[in-house]
């Protein structure tokens, strides 16, 4: 496969995705649609960042919501005190969460496989308990409120635009999605991505050919932490409130379902999983049936995850590829 063919599919998919997401609100400017799209885009960013460490490196970190929550809390304090603005808050959260990921990675990457997952899960639980207990710092169960809304300053305008409407937040989030997708594609389709694959497949052999596994694991962990931290900062400015529950296990479960049902380590798979489970909860709520109450939804997601792991281990992306290959084989030229 040539270098050009390796890049054309993910780049084409990214352009198609961004174009579709940019145009959808123009077709139906309802608040419900825009809020659903915001939720979908947020999950795509979250899942791509999670897949860098879970799919590309092969280390399933159950503690990624830590970066999300701390990034949000940083913004809750920095935005009103330092006056750094919405973009400055996101950049600071990204940098500090990348540093935190590097420090945590040095400790956690000493363990592997199930023990790594359990260790990061323990860190997430401890962090959430601390956030619940430190009421003077985080507001505890009453949450931290009063986070200022973003203001957009353009060169040709005398007054700043205050971001209030969901549609404004949506188009403020789309550039971040573009950066996330571009970074994901650039990393995974380059020499760094091939090193990620080598580390995931066999760390001993990768060391023998001159690849330093810890270096690449820390790099992937730092990029993932930075993206998730910046997303937490954006979310804090969107809802103007941050609670300890924003670091809960429900986020981890959702990420696991999106990435592994869609197809871990694959751009198309992660996007498919994010789209499916970003749209499915609102759809079930609209149906309003007693059979789709939140508790039953979690059971449904669990059943879907188990079925996919048993019968489609390569996820929806693998299923789509098999269907496409069979279609081409059955409809191709016959000799």
Image: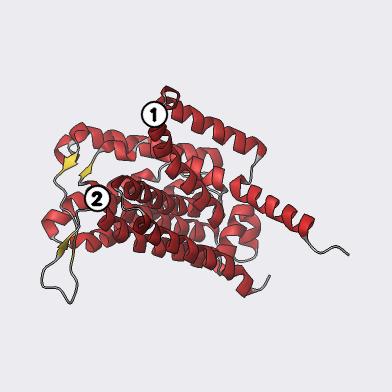
Q: Quadrant of the C terminus?
A: bottom right
Query: Residue at image x 66%, y 73%?
Result: 2
Above or below, comparing residue 91 to residue 236 in the picture: below
Q: Is residue 97 visible?
A: yes
Mark closer to the chain start, 2 or 1: 2
> Viewer-proximal residue, 3 or 152?
152
What residue occupies the far front of the structure in this picture?
27
Closer to the camera in the image, 49 or 150: 150
Mark 1, Cα crowd under 10 Å, few <14 / some 14-19 / many 20+, is: few
Identify the element where label 2 is drawn: helix
Task: Determine which residue is flagged by label 2.
Answer: 238
Residue that protrudes farthest toward the right in the picture: 335
Q: Residue 187 at x, y = what percent?
A: 50, 65
Q: Identify the coloring.
A: secondary structure
In this picture, residue 168 sits left or right of residue 312: left
299 on left or right of 84: right
Residue 110 shown left or right of residue 314 in the figure: left
Disc on res. 288? 1
Q: Residue at x 50, y 30 (%)?
A: 300
Q: Position of residue 57 (x, y in %)?
A: 54, 53
Closer to us: 247 or 198: 247
Where does the image place residue 59, in percent across and percent down from the top left? 52, 47
Q: Residue furthest top?
A: 290
| Rendering coords of residue 99 (x, y %) | 34, 57
Visible in this render: residue 56?
Answer: no
Circle 1 SS class: loop
Position of the N terminus, as image quadrant, is bottom right
Badge 2 density bin: few <14, some 14–19, many ≥20, Cα 10 Å: many
Report how far apart the C-alphas of labels 2 and 1 lie in the structure: 27 Å
When the figure is inspected, residue 76 is found, relative to residue 120, above or below; the finding is below
The quarter holding residue 145 reads top left
Instruction: Using the image as rendered, state which of residue 251 and residue 101 is in the foreground.
Output: 251
């Amino acid at each position: 496969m040539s270098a050009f063919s390796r890049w054309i599919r993910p780049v084409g998919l990214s352009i198609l995705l961004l174009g579709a997401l940019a145009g959808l609100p123009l077709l139906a400017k309802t608040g419900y649609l825009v809020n659903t799209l915001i939720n979908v885009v947020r999950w795509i960013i979250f899942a791509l960042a999670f897949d860098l460490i879970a799919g590309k490196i092969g280390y399933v970190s159950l503690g990624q919501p830590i970066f999300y929550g701390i990034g949000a809390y940083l913004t809750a304090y920095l935005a009103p005190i330092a006056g750094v603005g919405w973009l400055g808050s996101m950049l600071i959260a990204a940098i500090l969460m990348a540093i935190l990921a590097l420090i945590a990675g040095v400790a956690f990457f000493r363990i592997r496989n199930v023990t790594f997952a359990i260790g990061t899960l323990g860190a997430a639980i401890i962090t959430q308990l601390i956030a619940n207990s430190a009421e003077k710092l985080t507001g505890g169960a009453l949450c931290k409120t009063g986070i200022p809304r973003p203001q957009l300053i353009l060169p040709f305008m005398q007054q700043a635009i205050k971001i209030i409407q969901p549609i404004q937040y949506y188009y403020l989030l789309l550039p971040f999605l573009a950066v996330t997708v571009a970074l994901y594609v650039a990393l995974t389709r380059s020499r760094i991505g091939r090193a990620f694959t080598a580390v995931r497949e066999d760390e001993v052999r990768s060391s023998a050919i001159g690849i330093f596994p810890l270096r690449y694991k820390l790099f992937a962990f730092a990029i993932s932490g930075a993206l998730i931290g910046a997303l937490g900062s954006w979310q804090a400015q969107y809802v103007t409130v941050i609670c300890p529950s924003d670091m809960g296990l429900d986020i981890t479960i959702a990420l696991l379902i999106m990435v592994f049902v869609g197809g871990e380590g694959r751009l198309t798979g992660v996007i498919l999983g994010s789209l499916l489970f970003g749209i499915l909860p609102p759809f079930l709520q609209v149906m309003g049936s007693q059979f789709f109450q939140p508790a039953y939804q979690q059971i449904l997601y669990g059943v879907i995850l188990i079925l996919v792991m048993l019968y489609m281990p390569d996820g929806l992306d693998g299923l789509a590829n098999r269907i496409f290959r069979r279609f081409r084989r059955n409809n191709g030229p016959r000799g």
